[in-house]
């Protein structure tokens, strides 16, 4: 069913932050390393494979990680250094193609259908990149090669760490069929439960339902599920993707009730506004308030305006108003607060659409 048109490589660095720390300090090699600030409010940024054996995972509370792995060595994150190394990795990838879509500091999609070195095989391109990363940066990367982005991303995780896996066009159907639906992009715990409730556990199960039935139950997402089940993903690798939002968030020193977080909202609004001002040619109309409760439930509330906010104070006022949309009990405690501006678009594009910001 799938007609391949691209050769996509997904490069994914192995335990990136922790691996950089182990590389730069030989005393850490072979030891359980957790990249996180110590303290009750911290979460794990990354864990070495030695620490992962104890069940430590990214985004886990640091206190829990310390209980799971008492011998772990905690290292405070150094994002400036991680970004610098990421740029070196990007430069290695750019020797082969200009079509690079970063997903984060440690992973990216590459379209190598036509590559600068004239290498016929995408697998050889991926091997060359992995070899250069190892030789020049003393780090390891895993790679997935496939006809499209979502398959390449699944494949890069197949033989981690320091592995490579290829999903060839003629093997797409056979590769996908036995997979749990949770392996498909966008199918998280909630969606997996909804699918399980109607008897869908694997991609084979999903294929058995007509697209119309999926669309009736899940809307447009149902149609997308059907496409993914058959390996269809026409998204191109997008280079130079502009930021769609700017935000600032902080984990609080102690849990606070909703009425106590206003000073933090105002401080974070100022911080987000400074980031927003660095993109003068782009405008945002949506203000977002993000909260995380003491039991790690994340909530977001947003408001889209007729006109973009003019000052940081405007953002702060709107974010404070958004608190009123939080329906949890008044005694609920919150451990994290974030403020953002989303939906950034080019000012010229908005101007071409007419007086979009005028009131009704």
Image: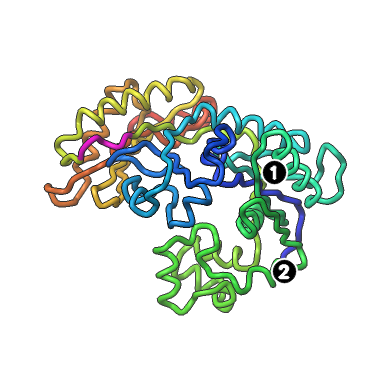
In the image, what residue occupies the spot 40% across and 70% down?
193
Q: Nearer the viewer, residue 146 or 133?
A: 133
Using the image, determine if residue 111 lies above or below residue 253: below
Farthest-out residue, front: 27
Q: Nearer the viewer, mark 2 or mark 1?
A: 1
In the image, what residue occupies the spot 72% across and 33% down?
136
Give the distance between the C-alpha atoms of the residues marked 2 and 1, in whole angstroms. 24 Å
Q: Is residue 232 left or right of residue 331?
A: right
Label 1 element class? strand
Q: Look at the image and say whether residue 272 sits in the magenta stretch.
A: no
* Secondary structure mainly formed by the magenta segment: strand
Q: Quadrant of residue 286?
A: top left
How dense is the environment of label 1, judged by Cα within 10 Å: few (below 14), some, or many (20 and up)? many
Q: Disc number at residue 110?
A: 1
Label 2 element class? loop
Residue 99 can be seen, yes or no: no
Q: Which residues are magenta?
A: 250-254
């Amino acid at each position: 069913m799938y007609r391949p048109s691209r050769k996509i490589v997904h490069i994914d660095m192995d335990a990136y932050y922790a691996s950089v720390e182990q590389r730069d300090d030989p005393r850490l090699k072979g030891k359980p390393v957790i990249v996180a600030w110590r303290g009750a409010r911290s979460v794990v940024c990354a864990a070495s494979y030695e620490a992962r054996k104890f069940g430590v995972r990214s985004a886990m509370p640091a206190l829990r990680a310390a209980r799971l792995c008492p011998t772990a060595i905690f290292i405070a994150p150094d994002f400036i250094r991680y970004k610098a190394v990421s740029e070196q990795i990007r430069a290695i990838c750019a020797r082969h193609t200009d079509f690079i879509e970063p997903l984060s500091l440690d992973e990216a999609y590459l379209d190598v259908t036509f590559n600068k070195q004239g290498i016929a095989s995408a697998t050889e391109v991926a091997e060359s990149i992995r070899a250069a990363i190892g030789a020049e940066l003393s780090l390891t990367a895993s790679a997935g090669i496939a006809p499209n982005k979502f398959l390449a991303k699944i494949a890069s995780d197949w033989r981690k760490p320091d592995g490579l896996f290829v999903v060839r066009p003629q093997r797409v159907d056979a590769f996908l069929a036995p997979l749990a639906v949770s392996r498909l992009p966008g199918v998280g715990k909630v969606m997996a439960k909804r699918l399980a409730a109607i008897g869908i556990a694997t991609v084979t199960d999903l294929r058995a339902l007509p697209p119309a039935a999926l669309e009736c139950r899940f809307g447009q997402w149902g149609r997308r599920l059907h496409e993914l089940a058959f390996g269809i993903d026409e998204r191109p690798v997008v280079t130079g993707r502009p930021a769609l939002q700017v935000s600032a968030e902080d984990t609080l020193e102690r849990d606070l009730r909703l009425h106590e977080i206003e000073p933090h909202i105002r401080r974070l609004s100022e911080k987000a506004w400074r980031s927003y001002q660095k993109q003068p040619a782009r405008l945002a109309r949506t203000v977002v308030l993000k909260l995380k409760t003491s039991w790690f439930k994340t909530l977001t509330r947003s408001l889209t305006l007729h006109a973009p906010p003019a000052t940081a104070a405007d953002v702060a006022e709107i974010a404070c108003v958004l608190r009123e949309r939080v329906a949890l009990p008044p005694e609920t405690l919150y451990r994290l607060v974030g403020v953002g501006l989303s939906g950034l678009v080019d000012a010229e594009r908005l101007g071409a659409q007419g007086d979009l910001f005028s009131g009704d």
